[in-house]
Image (tube, rainbow, N blue to C red):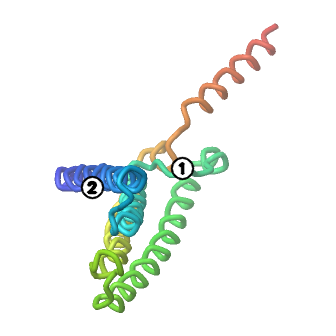
Amino acid sequence: MKKIADLYFRLLKLLIVLCMLGMVVLVFGNVVLRYAFNSGISVSEELSRWFFVWMVFLGALVALRERAHIGLDSLVKRLPPLGKRFCLVVGHLLMLFVTWLFLSGSWQQAQINLDVVAPASGLSMAWFYGVGVVFGVSAGLILLHELYLALSCRLSDAELVMVKGNEAAEEIEHIQHQQAAAGRNA
């Protein structure tokens, strides 16, 4: 199962790179064509916007799995393991609720806009809103898996804090502790 998840997230990273590449090619090509040849790519702005939206949502999924989102963990780090587990469970339940709202809203928008076509490309607007469905399902599965690990006590004490450490901040904290210890010894 882990291999399938790893493959899925490698695919997401590839799609993110392709979205970025598509945006750069379309926007740069459009600028060059406008200034050099007084013409342009009619779908450039629309597709660039779509690529950007897909890139953001797919990147948010990768960040969720890698625990790379910005967070404040100063209080949670100081709690005992039971308090950390409680905070993780409550946080995940709240995120699952919001993910459900997002998924159901995106699904409704995709269905409503299934027959609506984008003005420049002629593509169905369901593709634009479909990324919310992909995000909602994938994020829900990630959150449910982590919630299961937390409730079954399969997460270490460090894994109960859902924010990756900032190496610079940790180094500063380490230096401050060393200075405080040196001050007490002097």
Secondary structure under the numbered disc 1 in the rendered image? helix
Question: Circle 1 is placed at which residue position?
Answer: 81
The C terminus sits in image quarter: top right
Inspect the image, locate mark 2, and give the three-letter code of the amino acid beneath it: Leu
Seen from the viewer's position, the closer of residues 129 and 28 is 28
Name above or below for residue 145 compared with residue 105: above
Mark 1 to mark 2: distance in Å?
38 Å
Q: Earlier in the sequence, mark 1 or mark 2?
A: 2
Q: Residue at x 40, y 56 (%)?
A: 34
The residue carrying pointer 1 sits among few (fewer than 14), some (14 to 19) or many (20 or more) residues within 10 Å by Cα, namely some
Find residue 37 and report its image quarter. Answer: bottom left
x%, y% of residue 67? 44, 50
Which mark is nearer the camera, 1 or 2?
A: 2
Secondary structure under the numbered disc 2 in the rendered image? helix
x%, y% of residue 162? 50, 51
x%, y% of residue 148? 36, 63
Question: Circle 2 is placed at which residue position?
Answer: 15
Inspect the image, locate mark 1, and give the three-letter code of the amino acid beneath it: Pro
Seen from the viewer's position, the closer of residues 179 and 25 is 25
Q: Residue at x 48, y 44 (%)?
A: 157
Does 63 sit left or right of 171 as displayed?
left
The residue carrying pointer 2 sits among few (fewer than 14), some (14 to 19) or many (20 or more) residues within 10 Å by Cα, namely some
x%, y% of residue 134? 31, 70
